Image: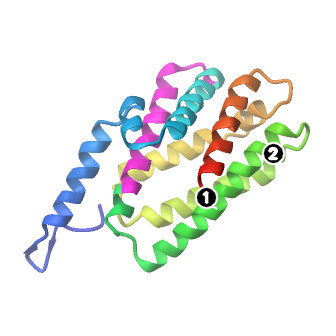
Amino acid sequence: MANTVMTDNAFKAKDIGLRAQKKILSRMASKNIAKVFIDETTASLLDNVYRLTKQQYGSKKDAEKLVKNIIKIVIKIAILQKNNCFTEDETKKTDTFFKKFLKLQMSIISFFEVDFSFDLTYLQKLISEIHQLLKDIVRNHLTDKSLARIDEIFESLNNPQFLESIFRHDGPHKEVMGKICEDLNKILEQNE
C-alpha cells in the first residue's frame, strides 16, 4: 500500500481504520457477503458471471476465484471512494472509467442482442482501456497483490477465445448471457 500509516511521526487512526476495513472485507469476500454490500441486481450479475466463467473454463475453482477477486476489488474501491482517498487526478480518471464502463455495458448488450454485430477488436480495446484506467486510479492505494488480482480479472475476461465464445449467436452460453444482459439492463435503468 503506497499510503503510509505514519506521516511525520504522527499517528493516523483514519489510515489504520481504512487499512483494517480493506483487510477485513477482503478476507470476508464471497458471493453471500457481497450481497450485504452490493445491491440485488449486481449480486445477480456476479452469480451469472460465475456461471458463465464456470461453463466456459470448466472449473468451479477458477470461476469462484474470479468472482471473489471481483468482489474484493469492488469493495476496496468502494471503501477508498467512501473515504475520499482519491486525488483530483484519480477522480478525473474515475469519471473517464465510468463513462468507458457504461460504453462496455451497452456494447455487451448490443453484441448479444444484435446477431453478427460482435467486434472483437473494439471490445478488447475497450476492456484494455478500462483495465489500464482502473490500475491508474488505484495504483497508489492498493497492494501489489490487489493489483495482480485486477490483472487476473481482466486477463480472464479479455481472453479472445472467451469473448468469441460468449457472443456466438448459436453458442452454448446464450441462456446465461441473456441473464447477464438482463442484469446489465437493470443496472443501466437504476443508474439513469
Rendered view: 165 above or below 189: above
Residue 54 picture quarter? top right
Which circle's residue, 2 or 1, is located before the other in the chain?
A: 2
The amino acid pointed to by label 2 is Ser
Q: Main secondary structure of the magenta part?
A: helix
- x and y, in percent, of residue 13 in the image: 13, 65
Kind of element beneath mark 1: helix
* Highlighted magenta segment, given as a residue range: 57-78
The total of numbered circles placed on residues is 2
| Residue 72 appears in the picture as rendered | yes
Q: Which residue is mark 2?
A: 110
Residue occupying the point 30% across, 66% down: 2
Residue 65 falls inside the magenta stretch:
yes
- x and y, in percent, of residue 59 in the image: 54, 20
Neighbour tally class for label 2: few under 14, some 14-19, many 20 plus, Cα within 10 Å: some
Residue 160 picture quarter? top right
Q: Which mark is residue 130?
A: 1
The amino acid pointed to by label 1 is Ile
Rendered view: 103 above or below 140: above
177 or 163, nearer to the observer: 177
Residue occupying the point 42% across, 48% down: 73
Q: Is residue 89 left or right of residue 26?
A: right
The quarter of the picture where the C terminus appears is bottom right
87 or 131, nearer to the observer: 87
